Amino acid sequence: MRILGIETSCDETAASLIKIKNGKIKVLSNVVSSQIKIHQQYGGVMPEVAARNHIKNILPVINKALLASPLLTKERGLGGEVDAIAVTRGPGLVSSLIIGLETAKSLAYAWNKPLIGVNHMAGHIYSNFINNNKIEFPALAMVVSGGHTELILMQGHLKFKKIGQTRDDAVGEAFDKVGKILGLGYPGGPLVAKMATQAENRKPALSADRSKVESIVMPRPMINDDNFDFSFSGLKTSVLYQTQKDKNYKKRIPDYCASFQQAVIDVLISKTIKAAKKYKVKSILLAGGVAANKELREQLGRAVSNNIPKVDYHIPGLQYTTDNATMIAVAGYYMAKQKKYTPYNKLKVDCNLSL
């Protein structure tokens, strides 16, 4: 079985072709056209600009993904390489989603192929299943991205239960806003993480006396609350207020980045470990764009090993953390196994789609 994945939920135009044989997934192509440089001048994603560039890029990106297949023959044509099409239907920017969805619907009609509408967040979770058949259920997925921060319990494939989420800013959003406060530019996440490596005091810990390991002390919002929800707007505001009072903050930007990043990581790890213990999970999955953060990947791994050593810890390859179409194709494969197809004339965009 071969599945074409299409992803246009925000500012990346992506297409991928995967092949599944005997339950094993092989990635034949993974093409992503990024618009980061275009949106940097605006300090964030401009929806109309993103949509225009999706229109320009979508067919060349799909063609490149299909032409990369070693199975291509002139006789079969591009459509002959595909058994099904999986496309992101939400959540995301409505103008961006429409481009990918309508393109997928047109190809499904022209090629007479079944169509699978995929939840973008499910795609992020299933990035952990790319070339990985060792994930056992129940599993706990921590999804951390620019627009989402969620803890998702999975009792089996496609059986999602949201047990915690942010009440305000998502983690990636908070990183971007802190990057803006500190004058680092957009996107803030990678820049804050890079600056944090230059800090004088970098000691990852859930320390009782954080002043001994941090030159700048940040709050850990909701870390002790009896729930699995998050809040990061106050942490972002703490950075703002402290820099406003600190006349020399520009000389201490790496320390601010390290302290902010560590506060975020401490909260994410604490909630994840508590949830994993409560629900007695066998696997923990890290997913989403912020899953590319090196400190988060490493510290969560150590926390799992130290606190719940019998639980397996899974992280996706870095190329599958940010938005891509391979994760959409893989999620589409598991939906196809359950015959969760949608007629092309009934599939619609849902920019507020939830798991």
Image (cartoon, rainbow, N blue to C red):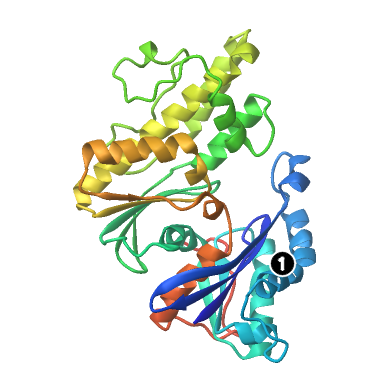
Compared to residue 106, the image places residue 280 above or below, namely above
> Residue at coordinates 31% horizontally, 60% vertically from top-left?
135
Which residue is at the front of the view, 56 or 219?
A: 56
> Residue at coordinates 31% horizontally, 40% vertically from top-left?
271
User: Hey, which residue is sitting farthest top in the picture?
Assistant: 247
Name the side, left or right, on which 257 lies relative to 163. Answer: right
The local crowd at label 1, few if under 14, some if 14 to 19, many if 20 or more residues have their Cα within 10 Å, is many
Task: Indicate the secondary structure of the residue bearing disc 1.
Answer: helix
> Residue at coordinates 60% horizontally, 19% vertically from top-left?
253
Name the side, left or right, on which 269 lies relative to 234. Answer: left
Q: Is residue 182 visible?
A: yes
Q: Position of residue 231 (x, y in %)?
A: 43, 37
| Residue type indicated by callout 1 | Val
Identify the residue position indicated by label 1 in the image. Answer: 61
Q: Is residue 176 visible?
A: no
Q: Position of residue 168 (x, y in %)?
A: 48, 41
Q: Quadrant of the C terminus?
A: bottom left
